């Protein structure tokens, strides 16, 4: 079974083709074009959507060529219907609807966050994990129960990815800023005291962001190091508590911030204490990509028909814990 997945929730426009055989999936192609704002600036939704429009046809063509297939060979098309930036989401939806209606192919609207989790399980082999989803759009601790992902903790304000991006832009980096901050942080070991805000099993990063901006004048390098150490310690605390609550024996980290090596080190230490297996999605697929959307669409096709075109909408604030997962 061949599926095409289209991702366009934020700065990335991506198309991917996956071949599904039984419970296994093989990624045949995953092509991406990323909107890059100027240094010190964040994503402008309208500019990002224009980028996606301009690159959509070339990304799709390259995706088909790399997979050595044609649109007529596809069994389904899935697209990211949310959550995300409205103008960007609509580009992917229009491309998916156009292809599905013209070639008479079933279409599946997919929750972007669930796509992160489903692809993570495929690529890591995790079966029943506590999931840490950390990206520019999400900071959530999740466990699966009764056909839904249940939230055991989340951010009360900005996400971990937003924390890194907003701080990075304030010191002149271009979004996404996580990798640049990680590189600077790795050259320091001088910790500056910063606010640490854990409330129950939720975290709050806005105070940490403001405080870190105020200490940059002392040392940009030390500020990056201290920001990472504080934020990741907060995440590690709530993960450890959630592992105790849920008695899970697997922890899987997905999302763009999963690429951060220091975060993985701290979480591995938590897992060691709890005799828990640690899984992290491969760096190549940690960020937004079409493969996440494609694989979830293929899984959904096992239990339901494609959506009617009138129902292929976008939902900017589509929480994953509102989605029934029947597959």
Image: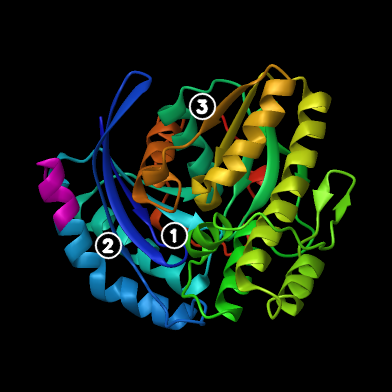
User: Pointer 1: what residue?
Assistant: 310
Is residue 49 part of the magenta span, yes or no? no
- Residue 11 screen position, x and y as percent: 42, 67
Pair 2/1: label in front = 2
Question: Does residue 327 appear anywhere in the picture?
Answer: yes
Distance from Cα at disc 2 to Cα at disc 1: 12 Å
Residues in magenta? 62-70
**Residues marked 1 and 3 touching at CB (< 8 Å):** no
Circle on res. 103:
none
Asked whether 251 or 70 is in front, the reply is 251
**Residues marked 2 and 1 touching at CB (< 8 Å):** no
User: Pointer 3: what residue?
Assistant: 327
Mark 1 residue crowding within 10 angstroms, few (<14) / some (14–19) / many (20+): few
Question: Which element type, helix, strand or loop, lies under badge 3?
Answer: loop
Circle on res. 98:
2
Is residue 65 part of the magenta span, yes or no? yes
Distance from Cα at disc 1 to Cα at disc 3: 24 Å
Pair 1/3: label in front = 3
Question: Which element type, helix, strand or loop, lies under badge 2?
Answer: helix
Furthest residue in direction right, as rendered: 200
Instruction: Name the main secondary structure of what is drawn in magenta.
Output: helix
Question: Does residue 159 appear anywhere in the picture?
Answer: no
Distance from Cα at disc 2 to Cα at disc 3: 27 Å
Asked whether 29 or 53 is in front, the reply is 29
Question: Which element type, helix, strand or loop, lies under badge 1?
Answer: helix
Q: Is residue 165 left or right of residue 107?
A: right
Of labels 1 and 3, earlier in sequence is: 1
Q: Is residue 206 left or right of residue 162?
A: right
- Residue 226 screen position, x and y as percent: 70, 60
């Amino acid at each position: 079974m061949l599926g095409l997945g289209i991702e366009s929730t934020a700065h990335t426009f991506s198309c991917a083709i996956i071949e599904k055989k039984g419970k296994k999936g093989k990624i045949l192609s995953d092509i991406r074009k990323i909107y890059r704002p100027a240094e010190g600036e964040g994503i402008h939704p309208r500019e990002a959507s224009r980028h996606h429009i301009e690159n959509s046809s070339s990304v799709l063509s390259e995706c088909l060529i790399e997979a050595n297939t044609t649109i007529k060979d596809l069994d389904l098309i899935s697209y990211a219907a949310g959550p995300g930036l409205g103008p960007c989401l609509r580009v992917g939806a229009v491309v998916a609807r156009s292809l599905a209606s013209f070639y008479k192919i079933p279409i599946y609207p997919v929750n972007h966050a669930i796509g992160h989790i489903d692809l993570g399980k495929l690529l890591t082999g995790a079966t029943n994990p506590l999931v840490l989803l950390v990206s520019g759009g999400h900071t959530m601790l999740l466990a699966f129960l009764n056909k839904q992902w249940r939230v055991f903790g989340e951010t009360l304000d900005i996400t971990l990815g937003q924390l890194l991006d907003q701080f990075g832009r304030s010191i002149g980096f271009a979004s996404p800023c996580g990798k640049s901050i990680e590189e600077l942080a790795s050259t320091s070991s001088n910790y500056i005291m910063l606010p640490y805000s854990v409330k129950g099993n939720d975290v709050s990063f806005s105070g940490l962001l403001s405080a870190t901006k105020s200490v940059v004048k002392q040392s940009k390098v030390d500020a990056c190091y201290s920001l990472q150490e504080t934020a990741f310690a907060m995440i590690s605390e709530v993960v450890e508590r959630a592992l105790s609550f849920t008695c899970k024996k697997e922890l899987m980290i997905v999302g763009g911030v999963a690429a951060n090596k220091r975060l993985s080190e701290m979480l591995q230490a938590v897992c060691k204490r709890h005799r828990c297996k640690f899984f992290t999605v491969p760096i190549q697929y940690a960020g937004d990509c079409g493969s996440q959307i494609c694989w979830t669409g293929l899984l959904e096709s096992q239990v339901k028909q494609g959506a009617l075109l009138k129902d292929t909408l976008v939902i900017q604030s589509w929480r994953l814990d509102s989605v029934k997962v029947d597959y």
